[in-house]
Image (cartoon, rainbow, N blue to C red):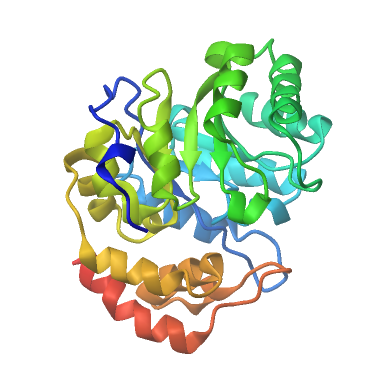
C-alpha cells in the first residue's frame, strides 16, 4: 500500500509509554488436548531474557479457544518460571462483560495489571458509541482493581474497528484505565493516524511495519514473531532497524493461517514436532510450508 507524505505523522511523538517487546505466547498442547504446561514453561524460560514481557492468550496463543480454568493454570505455570506479573499481559477475549470481568479478576489476583482487550466480535456493524459503552462497562466493573487495558485492533479477525474517533471517546470516558492500543491490522494508514496519540502507548502488531513506526512514536509490539526472533524485533523497536528477511518470512506466513504456522515453526526450530498441535477449530500447519520456512527463520536466530 502506497502512503503519501501528507498521511505520515509530521513529527515523532515522544515515547514516554515505551512498552518494548512482549512475546504473544504460543500455547502448546499435549496429545490429549490439554495445555502442555511443561513446554509452555520451557518456552518462557528460553525467551524471557530476550523480551521485555510476555502476553498470554492472544490470537497467537489461541486465547479464544481456552477456558477459564485453563487460563488459571497457564498463568500460574508462567509465574512459576519466575516471570514477574509486571512483565505479563493477559488477553481478554469474550463478548460478554461477565466473562471478561472474570478473566481480569483471575489474573489480577495473581498480580497481573495489564490486559489486552479484544472488542465484542459476535454482532457486526456496531457503532462507535456502542463500542465505547461496552468498554466503559467493563472498566467500571473492575474499577476497584489497579488495572489498565490495551485496546486490541485486529478487524480482520474480530470484524470490529478501534478507529481514531472511537479511541478518543473511550479514553475520554475511561481515562487512564486505557494504557494504549495494539494495532494488528497491518494498515499503515491506520497506524499513521494513531501514532501521534502521545497520551497512549501505541503498539504495532504487524512486524513488517515496526521499523518505520519506531521513530514515529511507536511504543513497542505484542507480536508472534517474538517467539522466534526476539533479537530482531528488539532492533526494530529500539533502533528502527529494518529486516527485509523478516518481512519476506511474514509475507509468506500471512498467505496461510498464521497461528498454526508460528507454533509449528517454534517446534521445528527446536526439532520438537509436538508443538505442531492446535486446538479446534484451527488445523495444524502444512508440514511442507513449515519445512520451507524453518531455515529462513533459523538464519535470523543465528
Give the percent coordinates (x, y) of residue 292.
Answer: 36, 85
Q: Quadrant of residue 126?
A: top right
Q: Is residue 1 left or right of residue 12?
A: right
Give the percent coordinates (x, y) of residue 221.
Answer: 38, 42
Which residue is more in the foreground, 188 or 275?
188
Can you say which quadrant of the picture contains the N terminus? bottom left
Q: Quadrant of residue 272?
A: bottom left
On the question of residue 46 being in view, the answer is: no
Look at the picture and state if 153 lies above or below 268: above
Look at the picture and state if 9 lies above or below 295: above
Identify the residue at horizontal 43%, vertical 23% (top origin): 200
Q: How many marks?
A: 0
Q: Is residue 82 left or right of residue 297?
A: right
Give the percent coordinates (x, y) of residue 135.
Answer: 69, 26
Can you say which quadrant of the picture contains the C terminus? bottom left
Which residue is more in the foreground, 218 or 224?
218
On the question of residue 38 being in view, the answer is: yes
Q: Is residue 260 left or right of residue 143?
A: left
Identify the residue at horizontal 40%, vertical 74% (top origin): 252
Give the percent coordinates (x, y) of residue 255.
Answer: 48, 74
Identify the residue at horizontal 23%, vertical 47% (top origin): 236
Amino acid at each position: 500500500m502506497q502512503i503519501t507524505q501528507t498521511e505520515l505523522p509530521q513529527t515523532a511523538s515522544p515515547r514516554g509509554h515505551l512498552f518494548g517487546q512482549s512475546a504473544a505466547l504460543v500455547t502448546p498442547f499435549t496429545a490429549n488436548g490439554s495445555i502442555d504446561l511443561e513446554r509452555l514453561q520451557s518456552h518462557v524460560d528460553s525467551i524471557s531474557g530476550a523480551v521485555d514481557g510476555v502476553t498470554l492468550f492472544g490470537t497467537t496463543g489461541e486465547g479464544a479457544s481456552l477456558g477459564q480454568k485453563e487460563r488459571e493454570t497457564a498463568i500460574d505455570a508462567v509465574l512459576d518460571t519466575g516471570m514477574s506479573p509486571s512483565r505479563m499481559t493477559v488477553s481478554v477475549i469474550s463478548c460478554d462483560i461477565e466473562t471478561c470481568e472474570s478473566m481480569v479478576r483471575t489474573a489480577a489476583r495473581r498480580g497481573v495489571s495489564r490486559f489486552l482487550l479484544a472488542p465484542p466480535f459476535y454482532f457486526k456493524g456496531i457503532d462507535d458509541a456502542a463500542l465505547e459503552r461496552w468498554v466503559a462497562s467493563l472498566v467500571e466493573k473492575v474499577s476497584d482493581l489497579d488495572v489498565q487495558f490495551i485496546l486490541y485492533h485486529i478487524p480482520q479477525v474480530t470484524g470490529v474497528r478501534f478507529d481514531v474517533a472511537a479511541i478518543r471517546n473511550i479514553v475520554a470516558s475511561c481515562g487512564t484505565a486505557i494504557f494504549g492500543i495494539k494495532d494488528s491490522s497491518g494498515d499503515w494508514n491506520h497506524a499513521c493516524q494513531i501514532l501521534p496519540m502521545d497520551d497512549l502507548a501505541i503498539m504495532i502488531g504487524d512486524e513488517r511495519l515496526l521499523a518505520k513506526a519506531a521513530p514515529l512514536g511507536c511504543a513497542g509490539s505484542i507480536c508472534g514473531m517474538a517467539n522466534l526472533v526476539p533479537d530482531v524485533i528488539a532492533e526494530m523497536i529500539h533502533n528502527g532497524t529494518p529486516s527485509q528477511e523478516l518481512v519476506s518470512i511474514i509475507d509468506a506466513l500471512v498467505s496461510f493461517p498464521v497461528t498454526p504456522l508460528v507454533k509449528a515453526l517454534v517446534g521445528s526450530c527446536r526439532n520438537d514436532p509436538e508443538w505442531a498441535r492446535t486446538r479446534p477449530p484451527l488445523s495444524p500447519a502444512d508440514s511442507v510450508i513449515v519445512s520451507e520456512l524453518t531455515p529462513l527463520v533459523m538464519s535470523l536466530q543465528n
